[in-house]
Image (cartoon, rainbow, N blue to C red):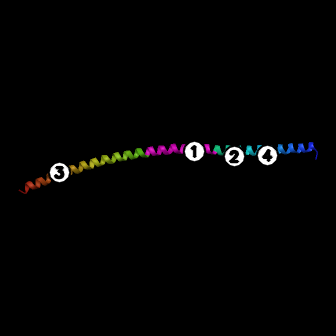
């Protein structure tokens, strides 16, 4: 093999290696771009889900506050009714004691 032929094959081999390297790099970039795109979509999806969950939490907290307020109101009414019944029973008891004399 002559020096010219040796140089030619060497350059040919280097160009083939460069092409294979370039194709490998391009393929890796395509893979990375695909992965990044999937991550971006996942982030968008999770962000939307997070917003919905925050709205749901706010709604549940509001309902809980409303129920707690309603419970306090009914407890106050119950206490008032109990107090009035106790007063009536005391008055009746006092009346029965007066009649027994």
Q: Is residue 71 left or right of residue 8?
A: left
Mark 3 Cα-neighbour bin, 10 Å: few <14, some 14–19, many ≥20 = few
Q: Are marks 3 and 2 in contact (CB under 8 Å)?
A: no
Give me the residue at 71% from left, 43% from top: 29
Span of residues in magenta: 38-59
Q: Which residue is mark 3?
A: 88
Instruction: Check if residue 58 falls in the magenta segment.
Output: yes
Sequence-wise, the earlier of marks 4 and 2 is 4
Sequence-wise, the earlier of marks 2 and 1 is 2
Q: Position of residue 25 (x, y in %)?
A: 74, 44
Q: Are marks 2 and 1 in contact (CB under 8 Å)?
A: no
Sequence-wise, the earlier of marks 3 and 4 is 4
Instruction: Say which of marks 3 and 2 sits in front.
Output: 2
Give me the residue at 44% from left, 43% from top: 58
Name the disc covering residue 20, or none. 4
Q: Nearer the viewer, residue 5 or 87?
A: 5
Q: Nearer the viewer, residue 60 or 84?
A: 60
Dot 2: element: helix
Instruction: Say which of marks 4 and 2 sits in front.
Output: 4
Give me the residue at 27% from left, 47% from top: 77
Dot 1: element: helix
Dot 4: element: helix
Dot 3: element: helix
Q: Are marks 4 and 1 in contact (CB under 8 Å)?
A: no
């Amino acid at each position: 093999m002559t020096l010219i032929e040796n140089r030619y094959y060497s350059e040919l081999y280097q160009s083939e290696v460069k092409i294979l390297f370039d194709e490998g790099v391009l393929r890796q970039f395509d893979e990375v771009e695909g992965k990044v795109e999937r991550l971006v979509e996942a982030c968008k999806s999770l962000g939307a889900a997070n917003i919905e969950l925050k709205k749901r939490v706010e709604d549940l907290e509001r309902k809980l506050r409303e129920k707690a307020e309603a419970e306090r109101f009914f407890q106050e009414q119950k206490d008032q009714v109990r107090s009035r019944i106790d007063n009536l029973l005391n008055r009746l008891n006092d009346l029965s004691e007066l009649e027994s004399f």
